[in-house]
Each structure stands twice: as structure tokens, then as C-alpha cells.
Image (cartoon, helix red, strand yellow):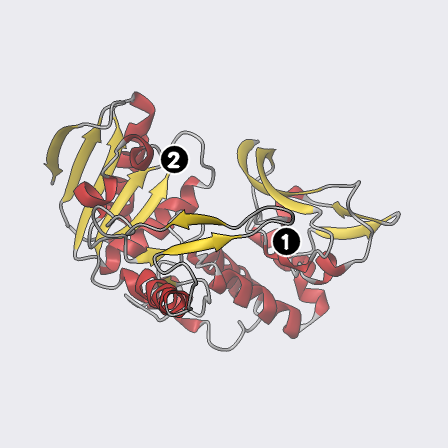
Amino acid sequence: MATRTIIEVDQDLCDGCGACEIGCPEGALKVIDGKARLVGESLCDGLGACIGHCPRGAIRVTQRDAESYDEAAVLDKILPQGPAVLAAHFAHLDHFGQDLYLEQAIDRLDNLGIAIPQGYEKFRKQARPKFVKPCSAFSRTLADLATRAGSASERIGSAPTRAGSALEHTSPGLNPTPVAVGPTPKPQGSKPRNWPVQLHLINPRAPQFANARLLVAADCTAFVMEDFHAKLAEGKSLVIACPKLDSGRDIYISKLAALIDQAESLEVAIMEVPCCGGLTKLMEEARQKSGRALPIRLVVVDPDGRILTRKTLS
């Protein structure tokens, strides 16, 4: 067994409503003795789609030693439930950009002589396109978010106040206290072009990754570098990962290869520690899988947040 992402049910919070069981087409959750139980570790893909179905907040994603996810075993449980459940499973994998699992599912169905759900022919290994617009509602540009935030700021800024350049806060039994409002400091550098950024969560087919200047950064780099966005991430599509703690190495290579397929340039930022070199190796393996000869620009950061070296890996 290896450490990987998997869901966990808080038995004290669970009331046995069964909503999560309905929301898990893979069949990993079942209500037994009035509580939801994870009945098969190999059936749980760890993506956490069931979390949103729980009204009690009893489900969370955790990292622990667990059996590897087995797409073939999942299909064996899904197929007797009919084509609608099979289609829901494919849509779930597509939503999270799990191309590797989709390939495995298609291979399994082909071996069984069963037709794949309509619209997923493009995920066959020999037919995968360079870029397909994703269906994920989570893939949206930060520019969209900024536009919404700006509109909200304008509405707030237009509201009249009795203190002119100050806002008044009144508590019961206390006199109004003016609070001075100063100008908002301008952020240093720009934000990346995409969200989410964690490699397990991103959809490599999202439009923000088409012809992108791709930056793959080790988790720690953004926290030790005070000016990470200005120096490294400005104008780039960002993906973060930890080669030491993250699970799903094959998934990472598959997603990185899909990103490299459509990237304009590649850059990887790592910490000056031996374990971080694993991220560079992942990038090199993914580049080989993609078949593209794009150079990889390597940036090494020390624990004080300083850039030690920049070099190109051909």
C-alpha cells in the first residue's frame, strides 16, 4: 500500500441519510447499520465528489496508506447498475480531468465488448486531441473572479457614509467609533491565470492551459518567496505539487503530459532539497510521454526564498 488521497467518514457526525451513497457512482460508500462506510478502498478515487452530497459535513478528504484505486474493479461494480450510472461515472472522471482513469475505463469496456458512453471516444489513447474545452465548472480564469470582485467593490464604494472618509462602527451601549480607511496597497506582481492550481484538482483541458506559459511549482516555493508572483508566476498558468507527500504519481505524469501537449513553454520551480528533485523527474517523464521536445527551464529556490540557480534542461 502507498499513501494517497482517500475519503474518510466521521461516524459521530454521520446520520445515515444515504445522500453520499447516491452521490458515489463508484460504489465506494454504503450505509451499513445506520452509518455511511467506505466499503472498498480500491473503489475510492479520492476526488471527493461525495463531500458535496453530505448535509452533515461528515465526509472529508485525507491522506493515508490505502489500496490503490482500481478503475477495473469500479467498472465491475458499476456495469450491473446500467448505462446511466456508467455515464455518470465517466462524467465524474471527465469533470476532474482524470484522463488516465478514462483511458483505463475505455480499455476495460473494450475488452468486455461493451460500448463506451456517447461523447467519450476522444479519450481513446490513439484519438486524444491536443485540446478539448472542459466541462468542469471549477475551471475559470482569475480575471473572471477579479471582474466580479471589482463590481462588488464599486457597489461598496458608492454607498454613502456619514463620516466621509471614515466608516462608523456602532456596538450596543458604545459610542460610534470612526475607523479610518486608507488606500488599498497595490499587490506586487500579478496572479496566475488559472484556478484551481493543485495538480490533482486541475483539469488539463481547461482553456487557461491552451498555449500557456506553464509553471509547475513545488508547494513550498510560493511560501518561502515573498515575491513569488512577481518573480515567477506573472502571466503564467500555474500548477503546484509536492513530490514527497503527494500520491498518484501516474496520475501526475498523465496530467503533466496533457499540459505539455499544449504548452508554449515549460518551467519548474523547486526547493533546494533532495526530495524536491522528484518534481523535475516527473516533468521529464511527462515530457517524454507527451513526445514533445520542449526545453524545461529549472528554477531552484533556497529556504530563505532566494533564487539560487536558473538553468535549461534540454
Q: For the point 29% across and 46% down, which residue is it?
A: 286
Binning the other alpha carbons within 10 Å of mark 1 as few (below 14), some (14 to 19) or many (20 upward) gives many
Name the residue at the front extreme. Answer: 175
- Which residue is at the far right? 33
x and y, in percent, of residue 142 in the image: 33, 60
Q: Where does the image place residue 2, in percent across and percent down from the top left?
A: 53, 32
Image x and y of residue 154, in percent: 35, 68
Residue type beneath disc 1: Ile
Q: Distance between the residues labelled 1 and 2?
A: 24 Å
Residue 244 in which image quadrant: top left
Q: In this view, does 277 lie to the left or right of 136?
A: left
Observer-nearest of 13 and 126: 13
Question: Which numbered disc, 1 or 2, marks the residue closer to the eye?
Answer: 1
In the rendered image, the quadrant that contains the C terminus is top left
Q: Is residue 107 left or right of residue 209?
A: right
Against 267, residue 92 (above or below) is below
Residue at position x 60%, y 35% in the image: 66
Of residue 288 and residue 33, the one placed in the foreground of this image is: 33
Q: Residues within 10 Å of mark 2 (few under 14, many from 20)?
A: some
On residue 151, which mark appears?
none
Q: Name the residue under label 2.
A: 242
- Residue 159 shown left or right of residue 305 in the figure: right
Under mark 2, the amino acid is Cys
Upstream in sequence: badge 1 or badge 2: 1
Which residue carries the number 1 mark? Answer: 51
For the point 34% across and 32% down, which residue is it? 220
User: Horizontal placement of 275 versus 284: left or right?
Assistant: right
Local SS, label 1 = helix
